[in-house]
Amino acid sequence: MPTFSAEIYSPRWEHNDTYVFDFERDTLTIKTPPRIAICKWQENRDPAWSGEKFEEILRNDFIYPPSILQDLIEYLWTSWRSGDIPADLVNAELQVVITWLNQITEAKPQTEFWSAYF
C-alpha cells in the first residue's frame, strides 16, 4: 500500500516536520512521531477517526489549518480507495494541499500584537 510523506512547517519549532500518510484499503494513518491520527473505513457510513484528530496534531505545532483540511485528506484517501485517482497521482495532490497549508501558516499575522496569540 502506498505511503507518502509531506513536509509541514511548524511555527512552534521553526522548521519543517515530516508527516507520513499511510494509505491502506481500510485505514488511513497520519503520523509524525509520537502523534498519530487514524481513519477507518466503514461500509455505508462516513469513515471514523480515532487516536488524535489531524487538526489537533497540527495545532500542537501552532499550525491552525482551515476546518476543511481533514476532509480534504479523507477525500484524497477515499478517492484513491475507490480507484478515482491512481497512487502515482495521490502524492502530487497531497503536496498541493500541503503547499496550501504551509502558505496559510506562513501568512499568519506577525505583528507584535498578534505574536502573543500565534
Image (spheres, helix red, strand yellow):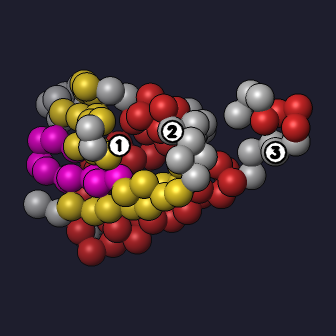
| Label 1, label 2: how far apart the Cα atoms are | 21 Å
Residue at point 41%, 34% (across, down) = 57
Task: Measuring from the top left, give residue 5's x and y in whole percent.
Answer: 32, 62
Magenta stretch in the rendered image: 19-28
- Whether residue 43 is in magenta: the answer is no
Name the residue tied to disc 2. Answer: 61
What number is the disc on residue 74? 1
Residue reaching furthest bottom? 88
- Whether residue 21 is in magenta: the answer is yes
Name the residue tied to disc 3. Answer: 110
| Location of residue 99 (image quadrant) | bottom right
Residue 75, visible in the rendered structure: no
Q: Is residue 60 left or right of residue 39?
A: right
Q: Report helix, strand or loop for mark 1.
A: helix
| Location of residue 26 (image quadrant) | top left
Q: Report helix, strand or loop for mark 3.
A: loop
| Label 1, label 3: how far apart the Cα atoms are | 31 Å
| Label 2, label 3: how far apart the Cα atoms are | 16 Å
Q: Amino acid at mark 1?
A: Glu
Q: Amino acid at mark 2?
A: Asp
Q: Nearer the viewer, residue 6 or 13?
A: 13
Asked if 56 appears above or below 19 in the picture, the reply is above
Task: Measuring from the top left, give residue 94's x and y in whole percent.
Answer: 41, 61
Q: Amino acid at mark 3?
A: Gln
For marks 1 and 3 on the same chain, the one whose residue lies earlier in the sequence = 1
* Quadrant in which the C terminus is drawn: top right
